[in-house]
Amino acid sequence: MQTKTNYTFATSGTGLWGCEAERTVTITGFTVARVDAEEAESWGVAEGSVAHVSVEHDSTWDVYTDDGFEKAARAVTGIADLCFTEQGMQEDGLASME
């Protein structure tokens, strides 16, 4: 299910890919994909667990690994242990997280 939001914050500049500190970014929405019964049995995890989170934003992919972005995404989604997936899955305007 997709959730729309409008959450603006400043990046911390701690990322590995050139995102500078104090860049203003707005998270505009997110989608949480959850594990279904078949996947739960196959993967050995609980049904309903978070499988993937897509976080829509108004910046470039280099927000990847920025602590400020990760903290904001956790606040918006309510998922306390949310973190980025691998670098190759990041896009301008869309962060791949789990």
Image (cartoon, rainbow, N blue to C red):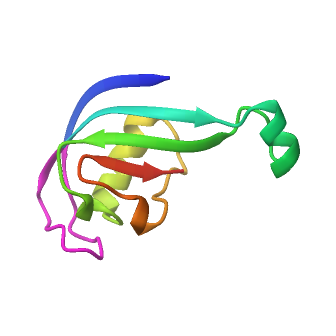
Determine if the magenta segment contains residue 62.
no
Q: State the image coordinates of residue 47 (x, y, percent, origin top left).
A: 78, 34
Determine if the magenta segment contains residue 11.
yes
Quarter where residue 49 is shown: top right
Residue 61 lies left or right of residue 82; in this view the side is: left
Residue 15 lies left or right of residue 39; in this view the side is: left
Residue 55 visible in image: yes
Residue at 55% in and 44% down:
52
Q: State the image coordinates of residue 72 (x, y, percent, origin top left).
A: 33, 45
Q: State the image coordinates of residue 61 (x, y, percent, origin top left).
A: 26, 59
Residue 9 lies left or right of residue 83; in this view the side is: left
What is the magenta range?
9-25
Residue at 24% in and 46% down:
93
Q: Nearer the viewer, residue 93 or 12?
A: 93
Examine the residues drawn in magenta and state their main secondary structure.
loop
Q: State the image coordinates of residue 97 (x, y, percent, origin top left).
A: 47, 51
